[in-house]
Image (cartoon, helix red, strand yellow):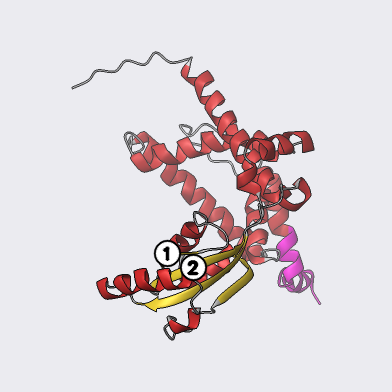
Amino acid sequence: MTLRSRAATLLREPLVHFMLAGALVFAVLSGRPPDPGERRIVVSEAVANRLVERWMQSFRRAPTADEIDGLIRDYVMDQVYYREALRLGLDQDDEVIIRRLRNKMVALAASEAEAATPTDAQLQALIDADPARYAAEPLLDFTQVYLGSDTPASRAAAAQALGALQGGGAADAYRQPAPIPATFSRTPASDVSAVLGDDFVAALGKLPVGQWSGPVASGAGLHLVRIDRRDPPPAPRLADVRQKVENDWRSAATQKAVGEAYVKLLEGYDVVIERP
């Protein structure tokens, strides 16, 4: 086999292709990205590595030599169009570009706060400031009598039925057929809301315990309700709500960091407002 034929055989090997492409990226495409106004485009090793890393994050595998070449061609094309667009002033007064750059500045300001880890004392302070926000979902105990759709006639019947129930009458004598449980025992508020609606659950919190009240409207119609038990929700414990309160802490810390960073930047500008 001649030297020429051996070289041709080697060049057909995929591994050799990958090694040559890597060498090309390392040897030719190096240096820091230039100013957008320059006419020279250099794809540095850092840029090439970043392109490969993004590919691997998307496709969960290393790119082939041809795919690396394609990534580099796309990057060069982006740079050409980007710099020519800047020369033409296409970035001026473009709301989309302005908003995206603003979002990048906000992300830079927020990055440190987003990566911070709060102490238990900081999280507990948030719970103490608003315990109702972190309290466990209430469990509801009540009995209901469904009276039918919400109409003037059913409301008139509700007044009569309420008086009878308060006087010791039998609930079944007034209950209309419906696929709704007559009694809810230790039922999470969200489960009751799924059946009867949020407004119904909110109304339960205003009713007295141990006596028939109503009518209370739900998505199904009208009900007479007797609250059988009402326990105050237990005080929230950090161990039970850590993720939620940590999310709140980080959100507040991020907003504070972004606001403070903007104030510092704004101090370097002389803002003149000419109102129409």
Looking at the image, which residue is at 37% across and 40% down? 85
Q: Tell me residue 237's x, y (percent).
A: 75, 47
Read off the magenta span: 1-19
Question: Closest to the observer: 37 or 266?
Answer: 266
**What residue is shown with label 2?**
225
Looking at the image, which residue is at 68% across and 37% down? 128
**What residue is shown with label 1?**
214
When the figure is inspected, residue 211 is found, relative to residue 232, above or below; the finding is below
Q: Tell me residue 103's x, y (percent).
A: 49, 39
> Which amino acid, by three-letter code, is at mark 2?
Val
Q: What element carries label 1?
A: strand
Question: Closest to the observer: 246 or 103?
Answer: 246
Residue 258 placement, left or right of 233: left
Q: Tell me residue 229's x, y (percent).
A: 63, 62
> Which amino acid, by three-letter code, is at mark 1?
Gly
Q: Tell me how far mark 2 sits from mark 1, CA to CA.
A: 6 Å
